Amino acid sequence: MMSKEVDVVVIGAGIIGLSIARALLLSREKISVTILEKESESGFHASGRNSGVIHAGFYYSPDSLKARFCLEGNQAIKKICKKYSLPLKEVGKVVVTTTQDDELRLENLFVRGLQNGVELELLDGKYLTSYEPLARTAERFIWSPTTAVSDPRLVLTCLQNEVIRLGGKLKFNQVVHFKPKIGCVESNSGKYFPKHIVNSAGTQADRIAKLFEFGDGLSMVPFMGVYRRTDQISLPLQRLVYPVPNPLNPFLGVHLTISAQNDVKIGPTAIPLLNREQYSFFEKWNMRDIQESLFGAYSLLKGNSHDFPKILQTEFPKLFSSRLVDGASRLVPSVKDVAHWEKMQPGIRAQLVNLKTGTLVNDFLIEGDSRSTHVLNAVSPGWTASIPFGMHVSELVLRNF
C-alpha cells in the first residue's frame, strides 16, 4: 500500500469536516489537506439531513462556544448563499408560549439572546398576526428577524467545491484504521503519515478519540429527528414558529419550519436510539452501539439534570404523524386542517453524555494535542456555526505546526 505524506488528514466530510479543511487551506499557503470519508458523498449523515434553519443564536449560554459561533455563523452561511446564488429565505422566526408557565422562560430566553448580541424583540401577543397570522401565543412572543433558511446539501456542495479548488483532496468510500503510536492513518486509498489528524467523524468521533486517549468519561446516545412535510399551499406559513424550550428536555421541541423548496415541516422528534446510524428499524443493528447507548442512557437516568423518563414518554409517540400534528397544532392550530403529511428522511443527532455527571454535553467539545484534534460534540447549531467553528479548530491545529 502506497504511503502518502500530507500535512493534515481530516476524518469526516460533513459540514464540520469540510469547514475545518476549508479554513486550513485558507489560513496557510502550501498546506496539504486530505479528507477521508467512509460514505460515498459528503454530508450523508447529520449535515445533509438537518432542517436547513440558519439559527440566530439566542438559545445558548452566553459563555458557550455555541453562542459565539452561531452568531458569527449566521452571517457566514448567508454570505456563502449569496456568493453562490443559493436559496436563502430570510423569513425570521417567532417563539410563542402555550401556557402561563412559559412566560418567564420566554423572558429569560429574550434576555439571553440580548446577552449574546442577537437582534430580538419581545412583543405583546396582539401583534403576532402581523408577523405570522397562523400562529398563536398565550401572552407574548419573541421575534427573531435574523433567523433564515437555506438548503443544507447545496451549501455542502459549495464548501466541498471550495476545498477542492483550494487544493484539498476528498476521498470517499474509505475504510479507515488508525495507528496512533506511529501517527499512521490507513485507508483503502493508502497509508497516510500526517503532521496532524482532525477527527470530525460525527457519531463515530468519540470512538476515534478514545484510540488517541481522549474522550474519557464520555459516551454517545444517538437521538433520531423525524419530520413531516406538506406544501405551503396547504399551510401558508410565512415565518418559522417555535415553542419555548422546556428546561427538562434539552431539545427545542416540535416546531414548524419552512424549507428552501417551499415545504412546511413539523418536527423534529428527539427519540433515543440504540444504534448510531440506524435510520430504519430493519437495518444496521450493532451490538457495540447498543451496549454503549444503554450505558449512556443509564447514566442519564441516574443524573437529575434531565428528565430522561419523560423524554422517553413524550418522544416515542411522535413517531406517529398524529402526535406530531397534535404538538404542532398548539403553536399553529390550522396544522390540523392539512389532509396529508409526508414522511421525510430522518436524521440522527450525535449527542454525547457525560457518564460521571449523567448529563448531556450541551456545548461544542474539542479535545486534542500536538498530534490530533477531536471534535467530540458538534450538534445543533453545528450547521449554522460550522464556518467560524471550522476556523477556530483550524487555529488550534495550526498552533502545533
Image (tube, rainbow, N blue to C red):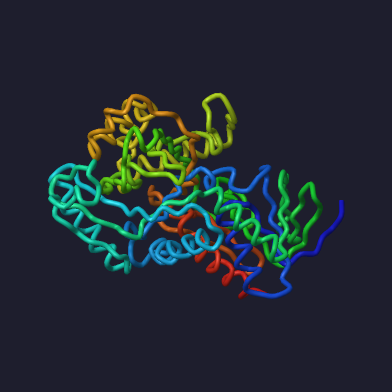
Camera-nearest residue between 393 and 334:
334
Identify the residue at the far front of this view. 233
Counting from the top left corner in percent of width and height, residue 142 is at: 23, 55
Q: Position of residue 280 (x, y in %)?
A: 53, 28
Residue 136 x, y percent position in the rendering? 19, 42
Q: Residue at x 20, y 52 (%)?
A: 141
Circle count? 0
Looking at the picture, does residue 217 appear above or below residue 268?
Answer: below
Q: Decide which of 236, 346 is in the foreground and name it.
A: 236
Describe residue 101's horizontal placement relative to residue 161 as left or right. Answer: left
Query: Quick check: 51 left or right of 135?
Result: right
Residue under the point 38% across and 51% down: 357
- Horizontal and vertical percent for residue 102? 18, 48
Residue 106 sits above or below residue 276 on the image: below
Q: Residue at x 63, y 48 (%)?
A: 42
> Splitting the image into 4 quarters, where does residue 51 fall?
top left
The quadrant in which the C terminus is found is: bottom right
